Image (cartoon, rainbow, N blue to C red):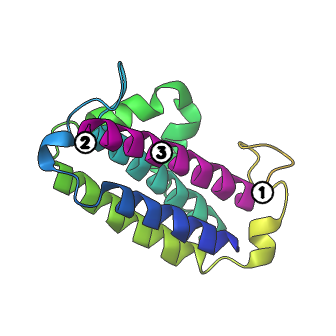
Amino acid sequence: MSIAEQLETAHLLVVQTVDNLPESEWDVPTAEDRWTVKDIIAHLASLEYVLVDVFNTFLEESPNTPYLSQYIKQHADFNSMQVEERSNHTAQQVIDEYEEVQAQSTSLLARIPVETIEKKGTLPWYGKERSLGDLINALSSHVKTHCDEITAFRNREKQ
């Protein structure tokens, strides 16, 4: 599976995982002391914005990368800050935002040559021996982990 297919598969998994989730379950913690489904999707949306910024560093000479900058500078607090920014959004607003930014990331990735995606050392902040493909692999795995968490929550709620 290509990197682009892997990213698209992760995106589809998110949409399928929350499909037909009752509105009342979006704001229930998925586990003790854990985020809600809405928080998880808000988190994944923020990571998609980071990807958009990363992809733009390969496509533009001097891109504006606010999410990537915040991710690098405030890594420990990035996730909670981004989730908090969306805390007053509805579930529909959060999933719409996710779908919009994931479409943007997919479109941008299609413009980056495969050789560039696979080239090691192009993301010094991520690791000298790592590539853009490695970052996408890690994000896809992270998405699957969160989708598994949501699925387990949904299964518990059915019982």
As drawn, 104 above or below 75: below
In front: label 1 or label 3: 3
Identify the magenta region. Answer: 131-159
Q: Was residue 158 drawn as part of the magenta stretch in this picture?
A: yes
Q: Residue at x 45, y 61 (%)?
A: 13
Q: Quadrant of the C terminus?
A: top left
Q: Residue at x 81, y 75 (%)?
A: 115
Marks 1/2 in contact by CB < 8 Å: the verdict is no
Please tell me which of labels 1 and 2 falls first in the chain: 1
Q: Amino acid at mark 3?
A: Asp
Q: Was residue 76 drawn as part of the magenta stretch in this picture?
A: no
Task: Identify the residue position indicated by label 2 in the image.
Answer: 158
Asked whether, in this view, residue 12 is left or right of residue 9, the answer is: left
Task: Identify the residue position indicated by label 1 in the image.
Answer: 131
As drawn, 83 above or below 96: above
Is residue 65 at all visible to an observer of this figure?
yes
Please tell me which of labels 2 and 3 falls first in the chain: 3
Is residue 59 at all visible to an observer of this figure?
no
Q: Amino acid at mark 1?
A: Ser
How many neighbours does mark 3 have within 10 angstroms: few (below 14), some (14-19), or many (20 or more)?
A: some
Q: Residue at x 39, y 46 (%)?
A: 151
- The x and y percentages for residue 111 are 61, 80
- The x and y percentages for residue 6 are 62, 67
In front: label 1 or label 2: 2
- Could you give the CA–CA distance between mark 1 and mark 2, rounded to whole angstroms? 41 Å
How many neighbours does mark 2 have within 10 angstroms: few (below 14), some (14-19), or many (20 or more)?
A: few
Please tell me which of labels 1 and 3 falls first in the chain: 1
Task: Identify the residue position indicated by label 3 in the image.
Answer: 148
Q: Main secondary structure of the magenta part?
A: helix
Q: Amino acid at mark 2?
A: Lys
